Amino acid sequence: MENNKDKKDIRGSLIRIAVAFAIGIAFFLVIIFSKGIINPESQKDMYKILVDGLFVPGIVLLGAGLLVFVTDGGAFDMLAYGIIKLIDVFRKDYENRKYKTFYDYKASKEGEHHHRWYLILTSLPFIVVSLILLIPYYN
């Protein structure tokens, strides 16, 4: 049974990475075609378009990954608890609320398993390839 759960976790991770990579490729294609990759004026201009097209999705994915990492680390837990408490004020059955204290909220979040690294790992190939293509651009 444990082996089956590991296979599902690996499969889920691969699906998350594939979706994030597909989103990055979609950003890349939109950027390079909007900048005119079909008929660039020079080879240097082509490198510029490719570097821009790879660097922008890489940084967007990295930023989203860092935001997920910080959020899963608990940086916004107090804000989320405050919003839940604000919504609870408007409920009819206020005494029957889910979390009575912030400690209860944190304790309920403690056991959750989060996947934090997939966006950061997906951003790295875009950034690395853009930095590699930056070398011939400056030569």
Image: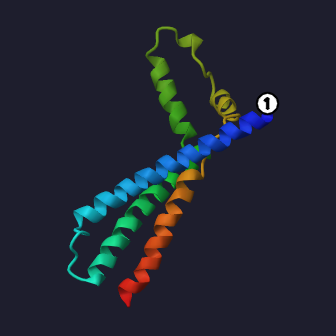
Q: Residue at x 48, y 50 (%)?
A: 20
Q: Which residue is mark 1?
A: 1
Q: Inspect the image, locate mark 1, and give the three-letter code of the amino acid beneath it.
A: Met
Q: Is residue 104 above or below residue 114?
A: above
Would residue 105 be found to the left or right of residue 123 on screen? right
Q: Residue furthest right?
A: 2
Residue 120 percent across, percent down from the top left: 54, 57
Residue 64 percent across, percent down from the top left: 47, 52
Q: Residue at x 51, y 32 (%)?
A: 82
Front residue (pair 90, 66): 66
Q: Is residue 64 above or below residue 76?
A: below
- How many marks are shown on the rendered structure? 1
Q: Residue at x 49, y 19 (%)?
A: 88
Please identify the quarter of the rendering in which residue 15 is found. Answer: top right
Q: Residue furthest top?
A: 92
Residue 27 percent across, percent down from the top left: 35, 56
Would residue 9 be found to the left or right of residue 37 on screen? right
Task: Label 1, secondary structure: give it.
Answer: loop
Front residue (pair 122, 4): 4
Q: Note whether residue 110 is visible.
A: yes
Q: Is residue 7 above or below residue 58?
A: above
Would residue 22 be found to the left or right of residue 32 on screen? right
Q: Note whether residue 75 is visible.
A: no
Q: Residue at x 59, y 47 (%)?
A: 14
Please identify the quarter of the rendering in which residue 13 is found. Answer: top right
